[in-house]
Amino acid sequence: MVTLLSGGTGTPKLLSGADAVFDPGETTVVGNTGDDVELGGHLVCPDVDTVLYLRGDRLDRDTWWGIADDSATTHGELVDIAESAGLGTEPRYLDDDRQTAGREIARWRRFSGVGEFMLIGDADRAVHLTRTSLIDEGATLTGATRTLADAFELTVDLLPMSDDPVATIVHTPEGPMHFQEFWVARGGEPAIESVEFRGAEDATATDAVVEALADPVVIGPSNPITSLGPMLALDGIAEALAETPVVAVSPFVEDTVFSGPADDLLEAEGYEASTAGVAEAYPFADAFVLDSTDAPDLDRPVVRTDTRMDDEADAERVARAAQEALEGVS
């Protein structure tokens, strides 16, 4: 049995080649939900959906987002109408009162669908509509995710980290903004002052997640702040990780990150933008998988390999290194 903590594209890339190493029937994937947004009334769960589409063999692997060969007729029409009406395509938050009205799971991340600043394909939209409708019928996010996983014929167990709302808010000199505004709409350009996981103090990990964390854990090369941070902000998660074998794959080679804004986010939260900073952010990690050219002085066991993952063979190599590291600390 093994549990992978997943956010962004790093851990899904690892998962793309993991079946030869970790038995899918004994693998649980816990997805970050801090990046989720309600867009035009539909709940979008980017990190959960990336795993859903990957394991359902539908993922667009060029972008590592959305469904391959998806049309975007509705998205295009939304953008065209907004531009023709002079409404623009900038993110449009619903007002403060509406941020905490309606379905609880979407609190602090509600956007109007006008202009639709995130590209949502038509088949992708059907998934969000189904998820939202199931929740409106009374399902939890966990229950809705399991229904979708069955529809996509997943062989791993896919779990959202919580059925409660946790929103990743990036504080900048231009004001606070949801991570999706910061990264998708603004391209990560505003300076980062700090990161808040709004709602985490009142949110809990699900019983299924807590149970999964009793198994050995692999953290892929995901962003330590915005992919893992929302999970670690939940009461009991860090403590559970301290009680089980944990191996983390670094998203850095020395001070160069593979993708995304992990370097700026680590520095904003007081860590060095490097593998050493990742190790400091993960005090519960028992061992690390590092690139062969990365040579930080860590106080924990290290397995080295080429950690770049351009295809499934690369991902299998990194997964085998993670398995080797787990065997060393289990």
Image (cartoon, grey):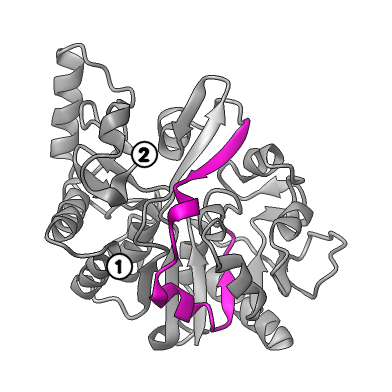
Among numbered discs 1 and 2, the one appearing first in the sequence: 2
Residue 281 coordinates in the image, percent (x, y): 70, 56
| Amino acid at dot 1 | Thr
| Amino acid at dot 2 | Trp
Q: How many marks?
A: 2
Answer yes or no: is residue 299 visible.
yes
Mark 2 sits on what residue?
Answer: 108
Secondary structure under the numbered disc 1 in the rendered image: helix
Residue 78 coordinates in the image, percent (x, y): 16, 29
Mark 1 touches mark 2? (CB < 8 Å): no
Residue at x-position 46% and y-position 27%: 186
Residue situated furthest front in the rendering = 202
Residue at x-position 28% and y-position 30%: 97
The residues colored magenta run: 193-222
Q: In the visual, does 46 lie left or right of 279?
A: left
User: Looking at the image, is 101 positioned above or below residue 211?
Assistant: above
Residue 159 coordinates in the image, percent (x, y): 37, 69
Q: Quadrant of residue 292?
A: bottom right
Q: Is residue 203 magenta?
A: yes
User: Looking at the image, is 145 positioned above or below residue 277?
Assistant: below
Mark 1 sits on what residue?
Answer: 142
Q: Which of 289/104 is in front? A: 104
Cα distance, mark 1 to mark 2?
20 Å
Residue at x-position 79% and y-position 55%: 276
Q: Quadrant of residue 204?
A: bottom left
Q: Which of 285/198 is in front? A: 198
User: Looking at the image, is 28 positioned above or below residue 223?
Assistant: below
Residue 160 coordinates in the image, percent (x, y): 38, 64
